[in-house]
Amino acid sequence: MLLKYKYKLKPHKSQAVIIANWLEMARKQYNYRLAERLNWFEATRTPVNSCPLNVSVVPVERIYQNIPEFRIQTRDGRKKDSNGNPVTRKGDKHPNIVNGYVVWETVQLADLAQTKKLFPGYKSMHSQVLQDVIQRVQTTMDNFTKPDKNGKTSGRPKLKGRHYYNSFSYPQLSNANIAKNANGRFCLNLPKIGLVPFVYNRPIPEGFKVKTGTVIREVDGYYISLSIEDKTVPVEVVEIQPTLENSKGIDLGLLHYAVTSDGEFIEVPKFFRLCEHRLSKLQVRLAKKQKHSKSWKILKRKVAKLHQLIARQRLDWQFKLAYHLFSDISVIFLEDLQISNLVRRCKAKLGDNGQFLPNGQSAKSGLNKSLQDAAFGQFIQILEYVAWKLGKRVIKVDPKGTSQYCWECLRKVSKSLSERWHSCRNCGQELDRDYNSALLIQKIGLLSTQEEDITSVKTAVRANQTEESRDAFVSATSGVCQNL
């Protein structure tokens, strides 16, 4: 099992200066290495219609300029075989170009020695911290060039500004790095920084070993995120068979944050909306100050602290809500929401003369702000984490049609977004629209876990119509037989 624990660092002034310098040097190195990769990537590509496909895009000499064909290993490798001998040895030759592609990670890692000669300031950084910067560049380029399981790639990587590179990592730490100083205060022994005091508010669980540590800069100081692992603890997903008694359905919305199938209505906290006026006043004052002046920096820090307060309030409230929802049941059904589709901009409308027509984006912007303030995506992740931690289960249901059908008879009851009351003419159900959706989500979730044919509201409606027609046919044929 792999977990992450986050602690607040309390560095001395000299240590805080070192951390700030390391972050700036790591940012510059990241930007340089990323630009090197992007320049090579763009120099070897051209639009298909710009030249014949049977010739090289650029001269071969330019493609592999300043890139050695081989690299020679300077020491024995750390990995060993079953006999205890190193897998790779000093003097081994490794190719830097494989099938025409440059192995950039190894080339840039080997070039760090030259970087330290040209810029002696990098000698003060821990070698593994500097190597982790290259690995971050490699991960960024992999996300850009290699598709994920859904066949999608991330956008073109950007160079990091001063306020957008806020962490560096120690790839190898251990429990021995947590120690006490001469005053008996808990400290983290960070290589080349020293014993850094920190708030040891929760101990490392017994059996878990510290693997890595990431120093993070936030507006209120520095934090460290420790990755801890215990391989003897299995990571298992609990398989609980949902029933009507041990489960509940949840409908998420903006009028009520969550409505459960047992009739509980949870109001929307609106953390950002409540602080919006205060935030706008600070931003107006900030816009009037000279950029990078002392007063500008003070106001910018206040704005950042207010944003941090809003985010922490929301996170704390969502964790408490997740534990509350799981207090009396074991399975929760909720909609598999596509948040990116919910906050998407309205399509542009063009008139006959080519001018843009009103498309409702002004109202949609306010709705998007409320959706972002509610942070449904973050809440669903928290709900899944709490379920895993408590040994319970979260099951997602197809959201299509959950607000347009009656939960009792599965008949369609069309409603606009402004209609908040559900009234079914077929079975006579009269209840709140969101409450009806919660009951329907629970019903579809239970049917989907019990019957393989039902996976959404539409399949449940189709199965229900088939059953009703079968019953009607049976009753009609039985009446004919009695008459005969």
Image: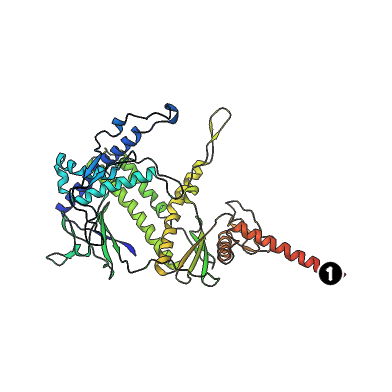
Residue extending farthest to the front is: 83
Residue extending farthest to the right is: 484
Q: Residue, x 60% and y 54% (percent of image)? A: 419
Q: Residue, x 44% and y 71% (percent of image)? A: 327
Q: Which residue is mark 1?
A: 481
Seen in the image, is 440 located left or right of residue 162? right
Q: Which quarter of the picture shows residue 122?
A: top left
Q: Nearer the viewer, residue 379 or 149?
A: 149
Q: Amino acid at mark 1?
A: Cys
Residue 426 in sight here: no
Q: Which quarter of the picture shows residue 378?
A: bottom left
Whole-percent x, y for residue 73 in the image = 20, 47
Q: Residue, x 39% and y 57% (percent of image)? A: 314
Whole-percent x, y for residue 250 in the image = 51, 62
* Within-10-Å neighbours for mark 1: few <14, some 14–19, many 20+: few
Whole-percent x, y for residue 46 in the image = 39, 31
Seen in the image, is 121 located left or right of residue 44? left
Query: Which quarter of the image is occupied by the C terminus?
Result: bottom right
Residue extending farthest to the left is: 182
> In this rendering, is residue 114 above or below 452?
above
Q: Nearer the viewer, residue 474 or 45?
A: 45
Query: Which quarter of the image is occupied by the N terminus?
Result: bottom left
Whole-percent x, y for residue 129 in the image = 22, 51
> In this rendering, is residue 385 above or below 371?
below
Residue 430 in sight here: yes
Q: Nearer the viewer, residue 206 or 11?
A: 206
Find numbered disc 1 in the image and state the secondary structure of the residue it sits on: helix
